[in-house]
Image (cartoon, helix red, strand yellow):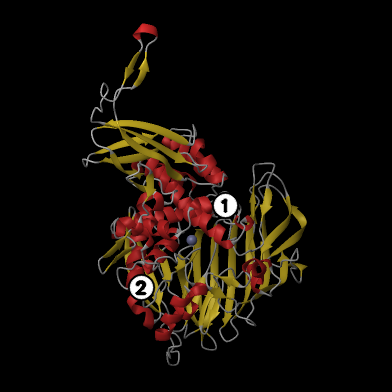
Amino acid sequence: MVIVVALACLAACGRDHGSARVRPLPKKDGSPALRGGGAPKSPRIANYKIEARLDAERHQITATETVTWTNTGTSAVDKLPFHLYLNAFKNESTLFMQSSRGMMRGARAAAGNWGWIQVDSVQLAGSELVSRLAPTGPDETVAELTLPAPVEAGATIKLDLKFTAQLPEVFARTGYKGEFHLVGQWFPKLGVRIGPPGAERWECQPLAVTTEFFADFGTYDVSITVPNTYVVAATGVLTEATEAPGGTRTLVYHAEDVHDFVWMADPYMEMISGQAKVADGTVEVRVYARPEQKEFARRHLDAAVGAIMNFSAWFVPYPWPVMSIVDPPLEAAAGAGGMEYPTLVTTSGDTVFARPGLRLPEYVTVHEVGHNWFQGMLASNEAVEAWLDEGVNEWADGKVMDEMYGARTSGIDWMGWQAQVSALRRAVVDDPASVPSPIATAAYAFVDPDAYGEATYSTTARALATLEETVGPTKFAAAMKAYAQAWAFKHPTGRDLFEALSTSLEQDLTWFFSPVWQSVGGVKLGIRTATCRLAHPARGVFGTGGSRKTVTETEAPATGSYLCELVVTNTGTIHVPIDLELKFGDGSTQRLRCEDKGHGAWERFVIERSTPLVEVWLDPDNKLALDSPVSHHYRLEGDGGAALRASAWLASLTQTLMQIVGP
Ligand SMILES: [Zn+2]
């Protein structure tokens, strides 16, 4: 990724855009924040009203914030924890910088250009509670506010804050590069109170390299003042746009039933738009890109439109009227690209190598748009169960790409090369059996970011694909839709997904979920024995006394048929039914199935045929995405032993799509 971006930059980075010009005042959206208006879709527990001003020279935001929080639990609350995410980029001692070693997805934190956030005032009903909200622990990304009086169950509290946010040079999902600003994780944000009634507790994890975000749904009313030369894209709909003193303008955005708010400000972006048709209306899709990335803007737009239509049809309809895709400048792509926020995502993948038909740019857009379902609406806790949005989304992305670009060509369709997205992923990512942490590991508890990435993204997607093929794609699609409909605008957990799938599929799937999510070892298929010999009636000495008789080869000649013995093994920890295809000397084939659901690690077959066994395919239809497909084809050599023939087609695939950008 680093090399690719660097080469691409030779052509386009550092381009002189001339001096910034005053941009036309943007038109108000004129549509409600939820398409067609309508009742709240979520409990709207945490609501924010923010007035922010960008100092574009210093890359600093000064703001006031009114946060309104309702205690929906059954017990009183006397402390409120706030995320202060930007403090992750304050110095080299933060948990984030320690856990990332200053690197993330190929981007390096720029020395000296640190980011931080400082809360200078917290007031309750006009009286000052604290003049400085101090971080709670050694890591400054969480601060706890002690309240003068508890918030009783069912009561609402309203606090007024003042804060200053210094953006870092863009690094891990937020910051500036030159005049480009991606303003994410930028305001004091409440944690989430979770747990069953009577046993509620706050979830407010400090920010580590592998932990993302978790927040309650609510409404956001955010006014942003920027220089009038800047183009702005933000979460929600634009409800007001007015010129302000000093060559600035103020834009007011309103969003409903979202759990975050992000905005982009840049003087050189242009916007193109299109429409995505969903069951109950249309969504305006906007792509923001600088002129030098114009050729990619159309590709991102088509991908986003297709993604919204497909995700809406398969899960729940996209409920908001607008979706914005920001394609960061190439020099900011590694830090700012490929990130999801409600109704606004950033994409990536624009390089001189991403020719039309090499679908990395499209994939990144589909993935990030898909997050508006898997985490945007199905708001799982990314710090604890990152797989529940990343991996589930990844599985769905493969389906959407197949639908949009054809199953055989969803990843590559270029110069005669063709590849499916999911096959590429399977080819370039490690065998799940080699990952030393199971999927169900908290994001912050993985041994390293690589293990986090493999288990969270790839293994989860492969596990779902394996289950899908095991129970049947049509049934599985209905079950996933039922899960999405039941849990949209809530906080589902992994257990909720498993229960929803088991209920819809009308079977206890513990035999699958338990080993796949809780254990290390994966599926490891192999052939232990594959031999054939000419069959003949039994020879030897038979009978006793006077009736003893010796049967020799002459009396018991070969029958002309072959007795073949085959032992299939699965030395992994996940036991799923395995299909086999046998090919015999006369070209005929035969299918067998090992119904292995934990009964053992091997199964023996004895087959009699008129010609010998010459080849064995394990999992010939590639249903077991959890296994590495490299050792699935065996050819019997002359000595009767099974010899491995590597599946060279996988090894030779281009690595163009290797960097499937997350998170
Ligand atoms: Zn992601």
- Residue 519 image-quadrant placement: top right
Residue at the outermost bottom position: 18
Along the polypeptide, which appears first: circle 2 or circle 1?
Answer: 2
**Left or right: 382, with 117 as reference point:** left
Q: Give SS at disc 2.
A: loop
Pick the front one: 207 or 520? 520
**Left or right: 286, with 99 as reference point:** left
Q: Say which residue label 1 marks.
A: 385
Residue at the outermost front position: 546
Q: How far apart are marks 2 and 1 (CA)?
A: 32 Å
Seen at 51% across and 50% down, the residue is 433
Q: Residues within 10 Å of mark 2 (few under 14, many from 20)?
A: some
- Residue 128 image-quadrant placement: bottom right
Disc 2 CB within 8 Å of nearest ligand 1 atom: no
Where in the figure is residue 4, as x and y percent of width and height?
43, 76
Relative to 136, is 227 above or below? below
Indicate which disc residue 432 carries. none
Residue at the outermost right position: 148
Where in the figure is residue 408, as x and y percent of width and height?
29, 57
- Residue 10 image-quadrant placement: bottom left
Q: How crowded is mark 1: few (under 14 residues within 10 Å), some or many (20 or more)?
A: many
Where in the figure is residue 490, as x and y percent of width and height?
53, 49
Indicate which disc residue 354 carries. 2
Where in the figure is residue 191, as x and y percent of width and height?
64, 58
Work out whether residue 149 can be spotted. Answer: yes
Tag 1: amino acid:
Glu
Q: Give SS at disc 1.
A: loop
